[in-house]
Amino acid sequence: MQEKIVKIGLVGFGTVGSGVAKIILEDADRLADKTGLRLQLACVVDSDLKRERPVQLPQGILTNDLNKLLSDKSIQIGIELVGGTGIAKEIQLKLLAAGKDVVTANKALLAKHGIELYAAAEKADRCIAFEASCAGGIPIISGIRTGLAANDISAIYGIVNGTCNYILSKMTSNAEEFAEALAQAQQRGYAEADPIIDISGGDSAHKLAILASIAFGCQISLDDIYVEGIQHVSKTDVQFGGEMGYMLKLLAIAEKNQQGRISLRVHPSFVNSENRLAQVDGSFNAISIFGHAVGNVLFIGRGAGMLPTASAVVADVIDVALGNSATIFNHLRLKPRNEVVGLIDKIDNLVSRFYIRLMAKDQPGVFAQVGKVLADNAISISGVLQHEAHGPDDSVPVVITTHPNRQANITAALKGLADLNTVSAAPVCIRIVDIPEDNE
């Protein structure tokens, strides 16, 4: 079979860009034998032409002039790996206008401006492929769009940020405080010098917006997603949760009920320690999906890094070159915003179980006061854990778990508990997420 030559332009020659170049240049023969495609890196655009990279480019293809790529009509595919939502958006629009299909790993851009970019691609009769945007090397986008296409997906529970999973894993296994675990993550390259987009839950929200949109067939906005990060998590709560049979994870959750209402949220979550998601440690990502026909499927793998992410980018390049991406992209049907807004459930309507930790003064009648606040807000207790260790003001930690209740009731109860003069600090509240088990 005669090989088809596919010329590629790459914009952004950082960590992932270097990985993409490495795979294309070093594995060209193997990829050609496997696919019949001869991938050729024809142009690499970056603002820094002198920085050392872990791959050597052929002479003359590295440039800081985007127009060199845009004007080369022989380049069929443009890869955008610049990141951010400003210049990256302009680059993608220019690539599409120049008649090039786009491959990207830019989850923030797609989460914020995906609908506009998809429309621009449709107008230009081009496609956008974005497998690498959500979970590094895990083929989750293609898994949902093709592998699970026959399913009505009802729920997604995802560990989609390796930085947070590494930190929480260290807090669990080594009884470390958040700051210690974060410092280790930074030393090992799992966290940026400024880690706020990860630890605040923002990165997970970007990925959830993309996953939920294709899983539920809806135009999802970041404003639809409730977001809470892990920066205030204490090892005390990680340990107490462990005693009660739970592991703490930052979960990105998308749920759709039988009436079509959608709940979207990112927050620290206690998960039963026997659940498979709870056992995913370190920097790994995992996404658990429930479909009406397939039941539960679990995707696990490396969610970031040079080569895992580059693996997904090059897979998209191959799919675009084979024509598969255009076919799938052209059949992407998303319910418009005006039909979606009314389907989104607010966090106050969430029904969940909750973990509440109080620092209560060690004196008679305290638990009666606590019980009254909970009862006044229609909250039923499912379990209590108390240690004798004393804290400030001769207080002791008291952990309460609740039966399922509305978030609005819990929020009101937390305010009432904080107002008690026998409670010495603001109560800590963490949601307990009961992920369904597929045991058939």
Image (cartoon, rainbow, N blue to C red):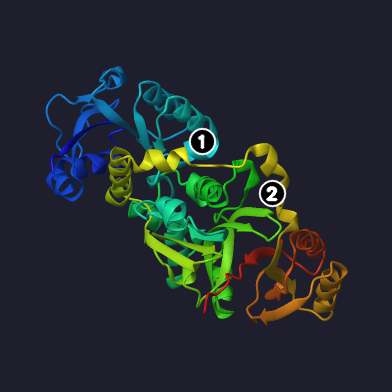
Residue 310 image offset from top left, x and y in percent? 29, 46
The numbered disc on residue 114 is 1
Q: In this view, does 374 lie above or below 48?
A: below
Check the image and report above or below for 3 versus 439: above
Residue situated in front as seen by the camera: 115 or 230: 115
Q: Name the residue under label 2.
A: 344
Residue at point 50%, 59% (across, down): 158
Does residue 11 appear to the left or right of 118 in the view shown? left
Element carrying mark 2: loop
Residue pictured at 68% horizontal, 55% vertical: 260
Image coordinates for residue 403, horizontal then vertical, percent: 73, 74
The amino acid pointed to by label 1 is Gly
Q: Nearest the camera: 76 or 16?
A: 76
Residue 161 position in % (x across, y down): 45, 54
Q: At which x and y percent is residue 257? A: 67, 60
Q: Tell whether 204 sits left or right of 47.
A: right
Question: In the drawing, does residue 243 fall left or right of residue 386?
Answer: left
Would residue 98 appear left or right of 407 to someone viewing this image? left
Residues at marks 1 and 2, CA–CA distance in whole angstroms: 19 Å
Question: What amino acid is found at the position of numbered circle 2 in the picture?
Answer: Ile
